[in-house]
Image (cartoon, coloured by chain):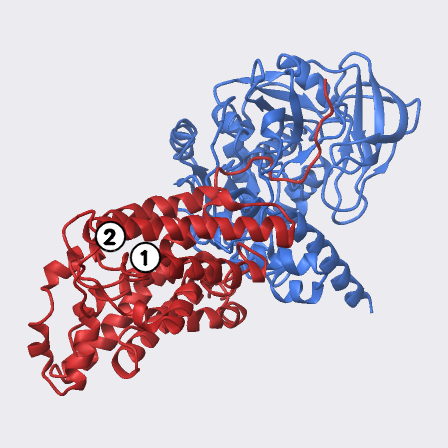
Chain colours: A blue, B red
Amino acid sequence: MKTFKIGGVHPPENKLSKDAAIEVLDIPKTVYIPLSQHLGVPAVPVVKKGDTVKTGQLIAKGEAFISANIHSSVSGKVAKIDDVIDTSGYRKTCIIVETEGDEWEPDIDRSPDLKEDCSLTPEEIIKKVQEKGIVGLGGATFPSHVKLMVPKGKKADILIINGVECEPCLTADHRLMLEKAKEMLVGISIQMKALGVEKAIIGIENNKPDAIKHISELASGYKGISVESLKVKYPQGGEKQLIKALINREVPSGKLPIEVGAVVHNVGTSLAVYEAVQKNKPLIERVVTVSGSKIDKPSNFLVRIGTPVSALLEASGGIPENTGKVVNGGPMMGKALNNLDAPVAKGTSGILLFPEREVPRKPMLNCIRCAKCISVCCMGLEPYLLAILADKERFEECENEKIMDCIECGSCLYICPSGRPLLDNIRVGKNKVGQLMRSRASN
Amino acid sequence: MSLLTVSGSPHVYSKESVSKIMYGVIISLIPAMLISFYFFSLAAILLTLTAVVSCMAFEFLIQKYLIKGPVTVFDGSAIITGILLAFNVPSSLPLWMMVIGSAVAIGMGKMTFGGLGKNPFNPALVGRVFLLISFPVEMTTWPKPTEFSTQLTDVVTGPTPLAVMKEGIAAGRDASEVMAEIPSYVQMLYGNMGGSIGEISAIALLIGGIYMLARKIITWHIPVSYIGSVVIFSGILWLINPEIYVDPLFHLITGGMMLGALYMATDMVTSPMSAKGMIVFGIGCGVLTMVIRLFGAYPEGVSFAILIMNAFVPLINTYIKPKRFGEEVKDV
């Protein structure tokens, strides 16, 4: 069975919510829609306090090339535009909308009928994707229209669809593959048309046999789309790892997947592309997994963007006693929340609750040079060395040792028997090396 | 609700720990320990016990009263040093020498550099070589293995097969002729020969090695490259002139070869970090062992070979890097 070659770990999967069908969460009274929910420049508001907005109406425009439009997820009145602590833990500007009813923009097709034919040209598809504010839903939230535009001089020959969901606990993509597979496949063929490629592979780890079976059956009706089952190994959902696993091509250090002719999109993104292009629906809601070992009802919710996290926790049975940490995203790469009222954004794939006793790290001891961090590093780096160099502020050496290749998957810190803060130090190093590189570029 | 913790990812941690690794090594040493108790009786038990207790005691005293830092005696690493040091001495060694050896192993070999993880040289080998140089007679008097008994007196001593071979060939005799004076391969494999307490049974050591491989405490790289290079080196010479060179199997099952390749060279603290580096390290150990055994003054070269290669580890780590992802750009 296929998988990537270098490194990787296999943390306990804990997919508690895999059998929980997607539930539509009630629309909250107030939504907090951040202007920066994507990688790149924040969007610029086009509404002001007191304006009335409809569900799906454009409220902030992504003006830069790498930016994304933002639409209102509810109908109602703009209460104010203010700074709110979002899931990153920092104050970010949000458009705050008080909900009144649920009146949608009239051009959005809300019928459940499957619309297969797409007569738009590639340019029109890309324009539509940009208009509707579609970003990568796997977690990195890179604006999708940028990925669909192949840069001059490069050529894409394959579209890779990421249905790996290698993070433990998360099941949002898994449920989507089971419940929205038809729409997803139409979305994939639209993306293929936009890119001008003949071939698409959907990579799914073999801990989701039901999804593999379901999608394989449906995909046989589509030309050029195939499904590949992959051996369970974290971080297979990393772009570079997935490309290596599926088509055995290695994206060179510091380059993008297009360098080897591949474009990678998440399964959730394909569904969003379908809805945007065929149904005119902007990205105003997404599926979020809520899970945790002590939680009453591990669930998958379809949530309007801007809903406070606390509303999701309430709907899944409340916050259990002795909860010590709440994480936005998966247990390996997610960010701990410092505010439970932070709003769900386009990149929020899961909310995980950890009981207090699972919170402390291992006691920190001397590095025993066991080299386990090297053997699990999916980029072939030496985490122990990078951590020492960063700690000693030897940033030029960090750069030579390819610190910027690190994808922060967390496998080194996960495996370390001595509980060394490897990734913490590497993050500091990456930050400083990034500053050094930018200052060099500007000189 | 109590306060929430905010910390960097990942938020889950593996069950790996330093003491789990160390106690794993100790478990893997049990078969060889039992064989040594069987052949060398009470003497082996007393020596092993003395070494373990004094290694732990010295580590405790240094950490508590000299460094005044945290005491980590029970992480298992001092126990391993003690067992391995005892495994590397003859069963007739006086116990007070063992105590001195332990002091050197822990004090000089480990704690002077900052304790576990910081030492460049394998502490047990530092202790062993110190004893070998300080007490050459006691360290090269090898009691013959006997069936288990509680008697401490009246041991018959004799040279190790390696020493017999080295002297025999130096005296100009044919290798096959000397071979008749030493135990058969089957006997040696099982451990019935003169030698240090723990090195005699290749089979018991192999069982322990396989256990460590299965538990992922060691990887195959060092043992395979070490043993492989010994086989190739001695094999070539044997094919050239079997009269003065013995076959590779002899070199594998005699002396500290197995103990060295499976336990001393694979010590994670003092071996290279990358897989490629480990292979270079293993080959270096193998070649040096054979050079010392065949052309050097000592009949046995495993300890020196590993200590010399330990010194090269920082250099190997600097110049031999793991294969980076995306390093070689493949044609599309």
- Which numbered dot is residue A403? none
Q: Quadrant of residue B90?
A: bottom left
At 42% from the left and 61% from the top, the residue drawn is B101
The spot of residue B238 in percent (x, y) is 16, 79
At 84% from the left and 35% from the top, the residue drawn is A91
Toward the front, the furthest residue is B153
Quick check: marks 1 and 2 in contact, CB under 8 Å? Answer: yes
> Label 2 amino acid?
Ser
A155 with respect to B90 (left or right)? right
Considering only vertical position in the picture, is B178 above or below A138? below
The spot of residue A19 in percent (x, y) is 48, 19
A210 with respect to A420 (left or right)? left
B249 or B69: nearer the eye?
B69
Residue B274 visible in the displayed image: no
Considering only vertical position in the picture, is B55 above or below A126? below
Residue B269 visible in the displayed image: yes
